[in-house]
Structure formats: structure tokens, C-alpha cells
Amino acid sequence: MYDRTAKFCLIVLSCLLISSCSLRWSYNLLDWLVAWEVDEYVSLDRQQKKQLHKSVDRFQQWHRQTQLPLYAEFLEQLESQLLVQKADSDTLMQSFNQAANLWQDSLVEFTVFAPRLFRELSNKQIAELIKNTSFETEAAAEKHMGRSEEQARDKKRQHMNKRLKKWLGKLNSEQKQLIEHWSLALNGNQKLMVQARQEWQTQFNQALNSGGSKENFEQQVQTLLVYPEHLWSDEYRHSVEHNRQLTMQLFSDINHSLNRRQKHKLKKSLRGYIGDFKYLAND
């Protein structure tokens, strides 16, 4: 479930994966999208659904007024870094951390309602929620552990090629070679990732079934939904950080290799999202 928590509250930040024209549509349907996602896990009664919609509406009002202008400002800074300053990997890492902080701020605000909603679930609803999240965890484990290390690298390479083509257009041979070298240098951490997810599921199940105090429960839920990395092993955390640094170096190398056509496409894409964020902030 923690994979989808971010999707619930930050449809807008998924703009890196969807077309600009659908961003405004998705954002304005946030309450409906959240309700649809929640329904994938647990069947809420009428009163619970009503409370969920109210919570999402409050979040969206806060997010629209305070966060969207920050997203536009962030992308304007990123545009300058990429197209004017030719950012190095350290600068891009700083930008990544800035984006991660914005993401986390919204997660914290969005999940304020989660402890109350969970505590109001019946035993039947809790059982349903645990069953559905456990199934998702098991399916993810089967998918990742069913891949060889070579298959996992191929998957990451294909995903990176697709993501960069979306922003830059057709990649040249030099850029494809950079992606190839990046994928070969990545740490293979499928087993560690699966272990982290399984530990999250164990903690989530225990939290839902516990009879602890309100304060302890709220702290547990916030850790699970906002700070799942707190449950990671040191080995997994170091592996993720290693791969992240390699990825920032890749982005820096790709950035320095852009031709005129790719720069134009990148600028046009960034400008589109900046315009969308400003439009939605004032809508």
C-alpha cells in the first residue's frame, strides 16, 4: 500500500509520467481518483467515504495554494540548471533532495487523516485491507524474485531509455551507451527490496491489529506511509544511495550531450509543466 500512498496525494507530481494535457484533468479529479484507489484495498461505508472526500478536499486546497507555486519555482530552477548552467551530478542530487522534500511535505499533510480512517475500520474491513495489501506484496515479490540479475538490468535500461526519450526525443548512440554503462554499474538489490517490502507489510499488519494508544498508532502509521525507508536495512539503504548517485551522474552526462533538438524538446516539456502548475495554483 505504501507504493500507492504517494499516488493518492501527489497525482500532480506524477506529471513526469503522464502527458501535460492530462495533468490538469487528473489534478482536478483528485478526490475521485483517491476514492477509486482506496476502493482497491478496502470497501468503505457511506460515512467513511464522505469523510475521505472531505479530507482530500482539505488537502487539495492546501496543496493548490502552498505547494503548486513551489513546484513551478522548482522546475524553473531545474530548467536553468539543465539548459544554462549544465548541472553536475552534485547539483542534480541537491535538486533531487529538494524534490524529495516537497514530496514528503505533501505526504505528511495528506496522511493526517489516515490514522483516524484506519481506527474506524471494522474487523472485517481490516481483514480485507490486510488481505489485499498482502496479496500486492506477494505479487511484487514474485515478480522481482522471478527475474535474473541480467533481466532486472535490462528492465531498468529499457525504463530509462523510455523515460529519457519522453523528455528528449530520439537518443543518439552516445547517450544509449551512457545508459548501458549506467545499468551495468547499478547494484542488484532485488532481494533487499523485497525484504524491505515484506518488513513493511509485517509492520503494517501489526499496526492495524494492535490495541495500542492513539499516539503510538498515529506514529506507526506516519512511519509506514511517509517514512518507509526507516524500516530498510543498512545494506539496502547503502545500495539505494549508490544507485541514486549513479543515476544523477547519468543525468549529468546526458545533459552535457544534448543536441539542439533535444534541448528544445526538454525546454518545451518543462515549460508545459510550469504553466500547468501555475494555472492550477490560480484555478
Image (cartoon, rainbow, N blue to C red):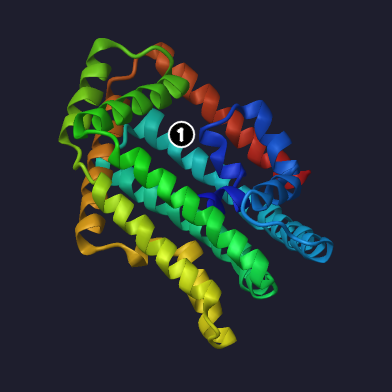
Number of callouts in the render?
1
Q: Which residue is mark 1?
A: 79
Residue at x 61%, y 67% (from the top left corner): 126
Residue 88 vs residue 152, the one in the foreground:
152
Direction bottom: furthest residue: 213
Measured as percent of width and height from the top left, residue 147 is found at 27, 34
Residue 248 vs residue 242, the one in the foreground:
242
Residue at x 35%, y 22% (from the top left corner): 161
Is 87 situated above or below 141? above
Left or right, 262 with reference to 18:
left
Measured as percent of width and height from the top left, residue 232 is found at 30, 62
Residue at x 57%, y 58% (from the top left corner): 106
Left or right, 253 with reference to 94:
left
| Image quadrant where residue 175 sits | top left
| Image quadrant where residue 165 sits | top left
**Which secondary structure lies at badge 1?**
helix
Measured as percent of width and height from the top left, residue 76 is found at 51, 39
Q: Quadrant of the C terminus?
A: top right
Residue 1 can be seen, yes or no: no
**Three-letter amino acid code at the position of disc 1:** Glu
Residue 278 vs residue 183, the one in the foreground:
183
Measured as percent of width and height from the top left, residue 39 is found at 68, 51
Residue 232 can be seen, yes or no: yes
Q: Residues within 10 Å of mark 1 (few under 14, many from 20)?
A: some
Is 209 situated above or below 87? below
Residue at x 78%, y 59% (from the top left corner): 49
Residue 229 vs residue 125, the one in the foreground:
125
